[in-house]
Image (cartoon, rainbow, N blue to C red):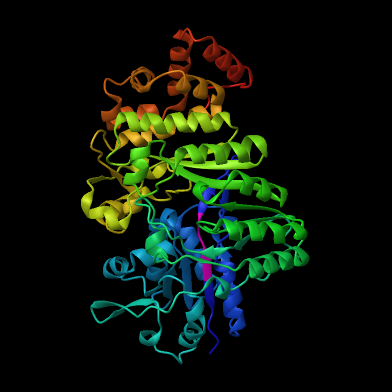
Amino acid sequence: MKKNILLVDFLLHRDKKDSYLCYSSSLFLLQNLFEKEGVKAEILNLGELASEITYENFSDLILEKNPNYVGFSAMVNNYVNIIVLAEKIKNKSPETTIFLGGPQASIVAKETLENFPWIDFICCGEVEKIIPDLVKYFNDTQDLRKIKNIARREKDKVIENTQAPLLSGDEIPKMRYNKSFKKEVRVEGGRGCPYSCSFCSASIYWKNKFRPKSVKNLVSEIKKIKEETETDTITIIHDNFFTNRSDIIDFCKKIKSVDINWSCSVRADCLSPETIDLMSSSGCKSLFIGIESGDKKCQKIIGKNLDLNHADKIIKRASVENRMEVTTFFIIGFPHEAPEQIYKTVRKIAEYKNYNCLVSVNDLSPIKKNLEKQKLLFHPIFFERKPGYFSIYPEKEYPLIRNYPEIFFPHYRMQGENFSPYFPVALVHLINRLLLRFPKTFSSWVLSIDSNQFINDLEKITKSDDVFQISEKELSEIFDSSKILLNFIQEMEKKEDSNLKTSLEKDLSELKNPVHS
């Protein structure tokens, strides 16, 4: 009997018009692989059908397809939503088999199956090699116990089957494209990262195996994409696009003849100023570079180990001299961070903003390998205010998060040696508001003061006696953007610095409603 397989894309967010959208995912690649095995797997994009944002509605939309198997791609920011929705589906249709895949499901597979009986099995890690066996399982000709990369139950015990060897870079399947792809196309440049930064779970998921595609094959793939689509822009997806400068140089020389705009993520210490020039001339229009901390000691503790002086040269060369769009990433809230170290990070953010960089600032989320060492706290505001996270039914989601920290740990925050769990959340919110509304004033302010003055100013802006030990109530008040921005304006107006006053005047003149959140 023909089986119906439904792959559900369930990652919601609000856009600027307050509508609901859904990001594309790797489900399209899985759909291609299933079709190669003679099985049609339908993708259901719940974001496109989100006229009513309820688990009841979503479960009805899924079950209207009469699926025998429902698969979810589980990320950090949608995992609790998927668990709730899956239970709703199973309650309505007990005979429907529900399976998960994706990074978060893979990392907490054992804990998930032990606690949520409505999840039938989990595909862990890379699944490309097991698609043929999964198809046989769907057709009742293969035993789930014999399929690699599967976590399942056997009686009352969770069993994790042996793992299939990881794919080499050139074994990564290629997506099928057509003329419907008219804008930016995403193409994998490889998988894994050879580094082991303490804050990143990529090394766990990819087992520290760095597997770039060969330059020859990647350029050939991009050339074919350009021929098969109407796109003129591709984004190379890889945690760290090449670590060898000679490979980057080779890629730039070959991709130049393809005549296509491209972007990638890369470490600053894998680049030289000359490499940046070559990348720009070959069509690279944007770079994504993780800096994380502006403090040298912190760089060593977290395992990032960047030479910050070198990073400054690279970012300035790319953004200022080559006019590339450079997005730099920072993290605030490492448990060991002292006020002086946090100030150095904020100062680095201000410096890069002056280089016309885009800046992404986030508070630190726990990862599984460090859970035992950390004192964790959950508060709904950590979930509700996190970009990309989406609460649909708090009465169901929040008890799950509280009861299973070993599964939903990304929604928790840590007690630092020098600050409360609320402080990094508050500071990141404030910085992001200021970067959005008062970018010139923010940079002028931070670069004109030292760490002690920075702390004093923060306490005046947040109306806190000790900003590093802010309370739950104070955090809620800080999230009142109108109030916090008014406080900021008032404090900046009191200062005598002429450059700062000029920056404030410019920012205010560019905003019709500068304190609206």
* Nearer to the camera, 17 or 342: 342
Q: Position of residue 195 (x, y in %)?
A: 41, 57
Residue drawn at x 61%, y 80% is 35
User: Number of callouts in the render?
Assistant: 0
Is residue 165 in view from this perspective? yes
Q: Position of residue 95 (x, y in %)?
A: 41, 78
* Nearer to the camera, 341 or 476: 341
- Report the side of 326 relative to 362 (left or right): right
Tell me where residue 64 sits by quadrant.
bottom right
Q: Is residue 248 magenta?
A: no
The residue range painted magenta reads 7-11
Q: Is residue 8 magenta?
A: yes
Q: Position of residue 232 (x, y in %)?
A: 75, 55
Q: Determine whether 163 is above or below 13 in the image.
A: below
Tell me where residue 507 sits by quadrant.
top right
Q: Position of residue 447 (x, y in %)?
A: 47, 22
Residue drawn at x 63%, y 17% is 509
